[in-house]
Every structure is written in structure tokens, then in C-alpha cells.
Amino acid sequence: MRLFTEALAVLLKVKLSFVGFHTRRRLDWLNGFAGEPGQPLGESDPVMIRAVAVATRRAARVVPGATCLTQAIAMRTLLERRGQSSSLRIGVARSIGGSLDAHAWVEVNDEIVIGHFAPGSYVPFATNESLDRTIA
């Protein structure tokens, strides 16, 4: 329940960060409740990662407009607080009508932990890590 409450607070904080400045100033109380990043990054803990993913998805059900991007940012924040390394990915796909669709997800050790989709359906934007490997 505590992890769910924290996930809910982080989702709300992320969601509200997209609103206007004046609205955010009125909602500064969320900063204290949502907490700040803490532990140094360490080895992946699959049990912790799964628990954070479940809590994030459950909390997203009660936050209106909790998009894939909102959930991915919240999930990455929660993992980072627990010393878990992860990567936020954003990709695009062309729909049947020809328009571009975007999607966000989080990966740990090249495995999608939130924001699942059909393999090959979204092409991720290049990241600093992938650009570094290309250049090297």
C-alpha cells in the first residue's frame, strides 16, 4: 500500500508538471509528499522492479490522463529512488492512416518493464548510450 501511495503521488506530480506555472505553485505540497531521489544505483532487483511496475500501473488507473509518458517518467523516478538503474525510451510508429503515433516505456537490462507493446511496432529515438556506441 505504501508503494502504491508513493506511485500515486509521483504520477500526480509528473502529470501536474505539465500544467501551468501558477497551478503548480499552488500544488507545491506534492513535492514533500512525492519525495526526492535517494539511493545510489546498484544491481537490478527483479522483485523490486516488478513491485514498482505493479504499483505504477495501479496508481495510473486513478490518475486521469496518466499517459504512457506520465507512467514511464513516474516509474523511472520510483526505480531511481530505490537504486535501480533504468532507461526511459520514447519511440514512434506509423499508423495505418499514415500519421505518427508515439509511445514511452521503461527498460531495465534491455527488458521492457512498463509500457509493453508488440515487438517491432515502435522505433525508439536514439539515446545518448546508443549514439556513444555508434561513434565508438
Image (tube, helix red, strand yellow):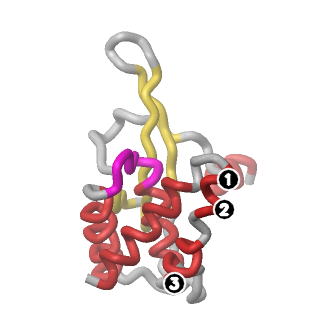
Q: Nearer the viewer, mark 3 or mark 2?
A: 2
The Cα–Cα distance between marks 2 and 1, rounded to whole angstroms, is 5 Å
Q: Residue 49 is drawn in which quadrant?
A: bottom left
Q: CB under 8 Å between callouts 2 and 1?
A: yes
Q: Is residue 128 magenta?
A: no
Q: Nearer the viewer, residue 70 or 21?
A: 21
Q: Locate residue 8, reporting x and y percent.
A: 37, 68
Q: Amino acid at mark 3?
A: Gly
Q: Amino acid at mark 2?
A: Arg
Residue 22: mark in rendering: 1
Badge 3 or badge 1: first in the primary sequence: 1
Which element carries disc 2, helix, strand or loop?
Answer: helix
Q: Locate residue 20, reporting x and y percent.
A: 64, 47
Q: Nearer the viewer, mark 3 or mark 1?
A: 1
Q: Locate residue 136, reporting x and y percent.
A: 74, 54
Residue 83: mark in rendering: 3
The Cα–Cα distance between marks 3 and 2, rounded to whole angstroms, is 29 Å
Does 93 sit above or below residue 11? above
**Going 57% across and 64% down the picture, which residue do you hit?**
27
Q: Locate residue 133, reporting x and y percent.
A: 66, 54
**Going 34% across and 62% down the picture, which residue do you hit?**
113
Which element carries disc 3, helix, strand or loop?
Answer: loop
Q: Residues within 10 Å of mark 3 (few under 14, many from 20)?
A: some
Which element carries disc 1, helix, strand or loop?
Answer: helix
Residue 56: mark in rendering: none
Q: Nearer the viewer, residue 83 or 27?
A: 27
Badge 2 is on which residue?
25
Residues rendered magenta in the picture: 63-70
**Going 46% across and 68% down the picture, which residue do you hit?**
10
Q: Quadrant of the N terminus?
A: bottom left
Q: Amino acid at mark 1?
A: His
